[in-house]
Image (cartoon, rainbow, N blue to C red):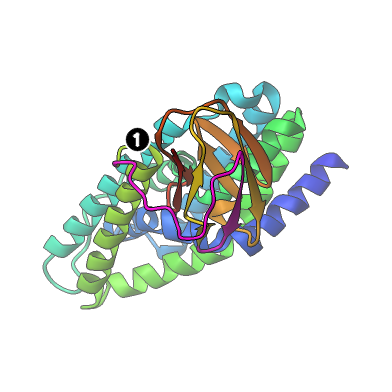
Amino acid sequence: MEATALLASGLAAGLVAGTASCTAVQGGLLMGLTTRAAGRTSDPVVLAWFLAGRLASYSAVGALLGLLGAAVKPPPALRAVLLVAAGVMVIAFAVGLLRRTGCDSPGRALPGLAAPLLGAATILVPCGVTIGMELIAVSSGSPLAGAAVMAGFVLGTTPALALLGYLLRRVSRTRMSKVAAVVAIAAGVWTIGSGVSLGGWLPATATTEPGTSASPIVTIWATSDGYRPAAVAAPAGVPVEVVFKVVDRGCTDTVVIDGRDLALPTTVRLPAQPPGSLRYACGMGMFTGFIKFS
């Protein structure tokens, strides 16, 4: 019964909250696959193998999370590196598409296992809601329940990715392929930026929003557009409680702060901090915020 309930929960999360973020983050990889597969095999076969590989890897990781807990969950720093690598891969695919001559020229030979392997690799580039599903799998304490919630989530996001794959293959056969390549390059740059942000490799500078007062208890609201206030003041030299509350569901449902992955809503108790800024980010690095200690 627990596995069935978690399967339904993951399916709902995929349909409602995960569709947009997963399509944005993993759509570039799907674009690379579809453009390279041109002339090699039929669209439905390539897409089906991609989605099957994705379902298999997510289910397997869910089972491992349920069995072993957080021990098999990649830390934020590793996810940041993987995001940067994924962005580079997307840009490489797009450059290859730009260099193609002719509207209908076939892509380079595609190894038979490329589609399922690339689909399976999407687990390494999770969308924001995926982190929340992984935390549920960890807390389930059961391989079956962990696999169920992750499989449900993949099934919930599959219709959007299937539609995207179809549209990308249609576009890649027309002169609009150049426009699609430019969009893919932009997506790759954005993915790299998310990885850099998640890794904390940007200068931690921020201006505190007017009217925000220093307090040992700080409240931050997670919305679909980011965290509010984006920069908040807190006193240095004393422990501080940071209360995260949820307004809208999405990438900001999870937060990486002080090297920890946390599902929201939650309260984070920070030890005394020196003067300066502490950066935090959503699970995918797409939205960031700052706590300025002074």
Query: Can you name the residue that lies furthest to the bottom here?
Result: 175
Q: Is residue 290 above or below residue 222?
A: above
* Residue 130, percent from left and from top: 57, 46
Q: Is residue 174 left or right of residue 250?
A: left
**Residue at the image position 50 percent from the left and 31 percent from the top:** 258
SS of the residue under disc 1: helix
Q: Quadrant of the N terminus?
A: top right
User: So how many labels did they put on this image?
Assistant: 1
Toward the viewer: 71 or 211?
211
* Residue 69, percent from left and from top: 66, 25
Residue highlighted by disc 1: 81
* Residue 88, percent from left and from top: 25, 46
Q: Is residue 60 visible?
A: no
Residue 6 falls inside the magenta stretch = no
Mark 1 crowdedness (10 Å alpha carbons): few <14, some 14-19, many ≥20:
some
Q: Is residue 98 above or below residue 88?
A: below
**Residue at the image position 43 percent from the left and 28 percent from the top:** 274
Q: Which residues are magenta?
A: 203-225
Q: Is residue 234 left or right of residue 148?
A: left
Amino acid of disc 1: Val
Q: Quadrant of the C terminus?
A: top left
**Residue at the image position 57 percent from the left and 65 percent from the top:** 159
Toward the viewer: 119 or 26?
26
